[in-house]
Image (cartoon, rainbow, N blue to C red):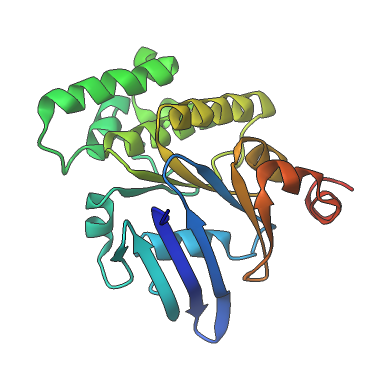
Amino acid sequence: MSALLEVRDLAVAYGHVEAVQGISFDVHAGEIRTLVGANGAGKSTTLLALSGLVRPKAGSIRFDGEELTKLPTHQIVERGLVQVAEGRAILTTLTVRENLELGAYRRKDRAAIASDMERVLGLFPRLKERLDGLAGNLSGGEQQMLAIGRALLAKPRLLLLDEPSMGLAPIVVQEIFRTLRAINTDGLTIFLVEQNVRQALKIANHGYVLESGRIVLDGSGAALLKEPRVHAAYMGG
């Protein structure tokens, strides 16, 4: 069975620095797959390339059989590849409701948007309590919930997440990851970039370990959790 997302020999450079060096991976429909590694390994650059925010030096990115490397970002989003950016990128001077509505700005199906809004507020009850308050008044964890909710309003077929646990308290991280698992159980495909290797591999069907722009290990999430090299490098031995 062909993958929903197929990445082949992807290379991305910033000037003379090659941040991603010819990596290949797949994401199949219905899965959670994760790309893990240390800060600076090239994880975020990989996501930026998938979303068309940086242009690859070489390689292929195919989504549902269509090549994406020449498409602008808004057309990639229209096809269902939606990213939750590192740092959340919410609009702090708008309300929670307005931020959520921005996720659906290209959609015309008003009844379905209203239904999806209710679903998002069911996933994140704290957002419902703060719906008409300024997004800038939310805690870091609530802002991450808002960023994920906004992405869900774009009706993704594949949700890309860049470091969703960054800067959050452990109890909030657990809540975010439980929600990601629930969203996936409902049928949404997820590709997750994370420095929190243990948490990412716990929920992933399959994982890839990125070091200095190259994939050095891959396997099921369960297998990588038991891999001595992964423990030594990312989980304290």
Vertical relation: 17 (above or below) 96 = below
Q: Residue at x 63, y 26 (%)?
A: 174
Q: Nearer the viewer, residue 80 or 52?
A: 80
In the displayed structure, 169 sits above or below 208; it is: above
Instruction: Name which residue lies at 44% across and 81% down.
Output: 58
Determine which quarter of the picture holds residue 96.
top left
Dividing the picture into quarters, in which one does residue 53 lie? bottom left
Please tell me which residue lies in front, 64 or 148.
64
Task: Please provide percent x and percent y for residue 147.
Answer: 40, 37
37 shown above or below 22: above
The one nearer the camera, 209 or 221, is 221
Whether residue 213 can be seen here: yes
Report whether 194 appears left or right of 153.
right
Give the camera-side residue of 82 and 145.
82
Using the image, determine if residue 172 lies above or below residue 19: above
| Circle count | 0
Q: Is residue 14 left or right of residue 200?
A: left
Whether residue 131 can be seen here: no
Residue at the extreme right of the image, as rendered: 237
Q: Position of residue 21 (x, y in %)?
A: 58, 76
**Left or right of 229 in this view: 191:** left
| Residue at 53% in and 62% down | 25
Q: Report x, y in % for residue 109.
A: 11, 32
Which residue occupies the extreme bottom position in the image?
16
